[in-house]
Structures are given as structure tokens and as C-alpha cells.
Image (cartoon, coloured by chain):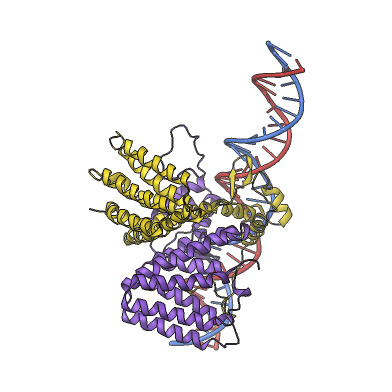
Chain colours: A yellow, B purple, C blue, D red
Amino acid sequence: MSGFGRPQNPGTKIVRTRLSDQVLERLQERIASGVLSPGEQMPSERELMEEFGVGRPAVREAMQRLHDAGLISVSQGGRARVNEIAADTALRSMDAVARMLISGFPNYLDHLKEARIRFELGMVETAAERATADDIAVLRDNIEMQRSKISSPDAQEFIYCDMDFHRQIAEISGNPIYAALSEAILTWLSAYHVHLLRWTGNETTTLDEHSAIVDALEVGSSETARDAMKVHLERSSDLYRLTE
Amino acid sequence: MSGFGRPQNPGTKIVRTRLSDQVLERLQERIASGVLSPGEQMPSERELMEEFGVGRPAVREAMQRLHDAGLISVSQGGRARVNEIAADTALRSMDAVARMLISGFPNYLDHLKEARIRFELGMVETAAERATADDIAVLRDNIEMQRSKISSPDAQEFIYCDMDFHRQIAEISGNPIYAALSEAILTWLSAYHVHLLRWTGNETTTLDEHSAIVDALEVGSSETARDAMKVHLERSSDLYRLTE
DNA sequence: CTTATCATCTTGTCATACAAGTTGATAAGA
DNA sequence: TCTTATCAACTTGTATGACAAGATGATAAG
């Protein structure tokens, strides 16, 4: 758990930088600095290996890592394209590890649930400060939409509306980090509860709680919104469970 | 922004799965299921290419991606070792993208600052519920340590103590996700303020605010701790700035 | 028993070759 | 002239062989 922001002590062993590391660094620089702007720009592997004076594996591995990080899209036959970077790009790159963490250590699911509650409480406070009349209308529409799905043949439709509700609050907050993080957390949590969740009998309770939250957002009261969200999340939190 | 938790429509175009993708998936399965436990277990590339019936590039690229995700450690000459997975493993894999996001879009620094404040507020509430007498003692020690660094020749020593204070609160919360996220956010933020920060004249104010937070933690009052942390963060927030 | 040497295994890198997909130009047809 | 089909030239995906460089453990010398 040694902080990785610290300047390294002069006694640490030197790191062997592989060629692909250096190529990766150069390419990252170009993308970060905008020399390679989002679109169709990426040079071919042959051009890059000639330019950097390295073999194809070095270039190839660097490109592979850029692809894994979500910075570029590569497809057979065509040149690689630089993606436009966003907050969800970063989170997507840790998706696999996060899933392994949750499935490998069940208590991480509890930690994630706890973090999610705190996160949503903070988010709804921010949303309360910035919600416009249009935002309120969108949320009210969503509630009605969800109400219409109560007796839907596909039970998951109801849950998708629920997720959309929280997604919309994330957008209202105006912070793209919130939006991306909310999306990611919902994805990870839903991977472990969707298929065993019924909600039978709690649908109207959920809708009432959502309405209370929107009411608080409408009058711009952070405290009320936070309290309403807290009630909502702590009740429904029990629905996310690995076993039992 | 299409939700990636949704089941894919049956009309979407099929994905060409590369060989390295399949190898990666198999290896990820083995690590997640514990067949490959943390330690020295990883088979050599030759063994894997023979076992899976693919060429070395496919195996190699898969191993490379495992390395980038932080799941294994590879070194020239020796076999790859499986790392023990933790929350910071996941966050480290998005480090590069996060930095590009902040440096490329300056307003993301503001978004991150906002998110950090909300995050610390939630974290300190949790910490207030769980802090033990020993935890309080550690925090008090840290404050004294930081006080001794006020007139240190190296101004950054003071800041490192400050970061440690927040790091310790993260640990007290008992949630490893908080600890890892706190660490990561501090790292990203400090990359953009450490070198231009003076704090001259504010050192004692900082220490007083820290003391107020610890006092609240000691009596286990979430609300008081939250308020104290809010005062502290909103005052010092102005110190993080790209320009000006 | 300690230490130095070395054979062997490993990953890092390169070069070449071919398969498979994409793209744009060219030629045939309407 | 416009549309369409064909194809040549790129591109990435993959396999193979080769050599360099580091790590490891056994062996031999002291």
C-alpha cells in the first residue's frame, strides 16, 4: 500500500523499460497532446515501426495496450482510429478487474453497496442544486414509465426503468464523473442481482420513494433529497445479495 | 452513452473474436476461479501455446493484457507470477486514462475536485461510525507529525502528512474501496497542484481543522465530522488549480 | 560447506510469411 | 453518363523461426 504519488527513493532498483513501453509512451503523448485527434488519424503499424526504428511486435503490443485502455479502436483490415476520450473510457478499462474482485471476494459486494449508497447521497445533493424544470419533467416521465411496467411480462423492464432513474439523476448533477461512475456501479451491482430479484409487492413503494426524491429536487432542497434517497436506498439495498 | 449492462439486441453486428481474446478469457477464468492462485503458478508461454493450440503472439498478447490489468507480473527470464488482486489493482489500470482526461479537459479537474469533496464527506461519516480509540490516537499522532513539518526545509513534507491524514481516515472507514479510491484521487489531484502550492500562513488553520475532524470522530458523531470535513475541504479546495 | 561457473529455461525482440478483411480504383454493364 | 461488380493494394491477425538477455538451479572447484 505504498503511495504511488511519492517521488521514488534513489535507492529503488531500476526498471527495465521494454521497447513497447517506450512506444506506448510516445503514442500516449501524441494522443494526449492532440497530435493524434479523435477520428481516422492513426498511422499504420508499418509506418510506426519504421518511424520508431523498432520491430512490429513492439508497435503491436503498444497498440494493443492503447486498445485495452479504450483510447483507440482497431479492426482487421482497416487502420486504427483514435477514440474520443471520456470518463466512461477510464472506468471501462477496469471493468474486468472489478468483476473479478466482486466475484472473487464476496465481501467486496458489500463494500460496493455501501460505497454506492454514499455515492448516490452525495450525487443527489449536487443534483438538487442544479436541477432545472426540464430535468424534473424528465424524472416524472420516467416514474410514469416505470409505473406502466409494473405488470409487464418482462420483470426486468421495471428494473431497467429504475436504473434509468438513477442514471438521469447522475446526468442532472452535471458532473460526467458522477454519470460514468453511476453507470459503472449499476452495471457491476446488477450483474449480481438482476436474475434473482422479484420486488414483488414493493413496486409501489419504490415509485413513491422516487416521487419523494423528485419532489425534493424540484424545490432544490439538498437535505430533503438526501434523506429521501437514503430511505430509498437503504430499503432496497437488501435486494442486492449474492446468496440467500 | 448506451448502457453497457443491457442485453445486446439481436440485430447488432457480430464481433470478430481474436485468438488472443479467447486466450485472455480462458486465463482470466483460471485466475478468477483460483486455479491460478497468487504466487508463482503461471505456466510458460510455450506451454500455453501448446495447450491452447495457438501461436506465441496470441498467448503473448493475452499475457500482456493481463499484465496491463495488473493481474500478473511478468519479468524477462522468469515466469509470470499471479498478483493478489485488490481494489487498487483496478484503479491503477485506469491511471493513464484518468491523467489524460484531466490534462486534456481542464474542467475535469473541477469535476474531480467536486467529486472528491462529496466522496470525503461520505467517507468521514462512515469513519465516524467505526473509529476506535487506536484510530483516534493514530490521527492525533499524524497531526503532531504534520505540525513538526511546518517549518521544514522541504515544503512538500507538510503536504505529504496532509495526504496521510486523509489516507488514514480512508482506512478507518474499513472499506477498501474507499481507501483505494482516496489514494487514487489524491494522486491525480496532487499531480496538478503540488508544485505550485505554498500554503503559507494557512498551516495552523489546516491543523486546527484536522483536530476538529478528529474530535468529531472520537465522539462518533457523523454529522459533526461531516461538517468539519466540509469546512476543511471547501477552504482548501481553492488551492488546487491548474492556472492562476 | 561455501562459492563460482555454466547449461538451461524463460521472456523480449526481430524478421518473414501468409491469411483475412477493408478500401478505393478500375472496368464492365445498364 | 451512371451504376455496379471486380480486383489490386493496402491493412491487421496469426504463425513460425531465430537470436539476445535475464533468471534459475545444478554442478564443480575451492
The residue that appears at 55% across and 82% down in the rendered structure is B157
Q: Is residue D20 above or below residue A38?
A: below
Residue occupying image coordinates x 55% and y 59%: B98
User: Horizontally, is A2 left or right of A203 in the view?
Assistant: right
Screen quadrant of the N terminus of chain A:
bottom left
- The answer to whether residue A4 is seen in the rendering is no
- Where does residue A69 sit, x and y in percent of width and height? 55, 54
**Count of labels in the image:** 0
Res. A131 visible in picture: yes
The answer to whether B148 is drawn above or below residue A173 in the figure is below
Front-lying residue, B17 or D1: D1
Which sits in the foreground, A100 or B212?
B212
Hey, which quadrant is residue D1 in on the image? top right
Q: Position of residue C4 (x, y in %)?
A: 57, 82
Provide residue A144's location: percent of width, then percent of height: 35, 38
Q: Nearer the viewer, residue B214 or B51?
A: B214
Q: Residue at x 65, y 52 (%)?
A: A56
Residue sitting at 52 percent across and 55 percent down?
A: A90
Measured from the top left, where is residue A140 in percent x and y? 39, 42
